[in-house]
Every structure is written in structure tokens, then in C-alpha cells.
Image (cartoon, grey):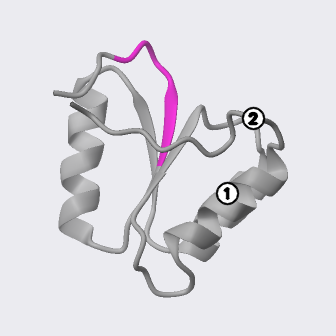
Amino acid sequence: MVPRGAGQHVLYVDDDEIMVVMVQSLLQHSGYRVTTCRDALTAVAAECADPARFDVVVTDFNMPLGSGLDVALAVRDLRPGPDTTRPWQLD
């Protein structure tokens, strides 16, 4: 079960169209605003354009045009601090 959101803005990155549709719908129905990107380069560009825009970035690992690790490292560089990259798992 996804924790209930209160309008937090999620950037979801995945090259699999079915996963994008499914996760976007799940998050929106759980109270989150969602922006999706289909590759790492587009996600990094969105983050660079406005680093404060997203409350959290959720990314697939294996994608064309860069990996989820590339996205995580770019986010870390744009938002330095102890809470920048924190693994999180739903129970």
C-alpha cells in the first residue's frame, strides 16, 4: 500500500510505458501530483530546470539514455544535503 499523499510532487522516471501509466495512476489516486519522464536525460533536465519543483524523485534503474543512478547523482548534485538520496521501501 502506498502512503497517502497530501499533494506532494513526485517525479517518476521509467522507460516502460505500462509501468509509467500504472505508477502514475496509483500515486495520483493516493494524493500525489505526478510528473513522468521516459528517460534519464529528460528527468535530469526537468530537475535542473527547477530543483525545488519535486518533493521526491522515483526512478527505474536500467533505462536508455542514462540509468537511474545517473538521475540520483544529478539530483544529489542539485540538492546537496544529508537527505538527498535515501533508499525507501514500502512495507
Q: Secondary structure at mark 2?
A: loop
The crowding category of the residue bearing disc 2, from other C-alpha atoms within 10 Å (few below 14, some 14 to 19, many at least 20), is few
Q: CA distance from mark 1 to mark 2?
A: 22 Å
**Amino acid under label 1?**
Ala
The residue shown at (77%, 44%) is 51
Q: Earlier in the sequence, mark 1 or mark 2?
A: 1
Indicate left or right for 47 with 2 as reference: right
Above-or-below relation of 58 to 9: below
Percent across and percent down for residue 43 are 59, 63
The residue shown at (57%, 69%) is 69
Per the rendering, the mark at residue 46 is 1
Regarding residue 42, the answer to whether it shows in the image is no
Indicate left or right for 91 with 70 as reference: left
Q: Magenta residues, as a range?
A: 5-11
Percent across and percent down for residue 46 are 67, 57
Per the rendering, the mark at residue 82 is 2
For residue 27, which quarter of the picture?
top left
The crowding category of the residue bearing disc 1, from other C-alpha atoms within 10 Å (few below 14, some 14 to 19, many at least 20), is some
Percent across and percent down for residue 16 are 27, 72
Indicate left or right for 28 with 60 as reference: left
Mark closer to the observer (1, 2): 2
**Amino acid under label 2?**
Pro
Identify the image quadrant of the C terminus. top left
Indicate left or right for 11 with 17 as reference: right
Percent across and percent down for residue 73 are 70, 63
Residue 88 drawn in magenta: no
Q: Nearer the viewer, residue 41 or 59?
A: 59
Q: Nearer the viewer, residue 75 or 45?
A: 75
Identify the image quadrant of the N terminus. top left
For residue 70, which quarter of the picture?
bottom right
The residue shown at (81%, 37%) is 81
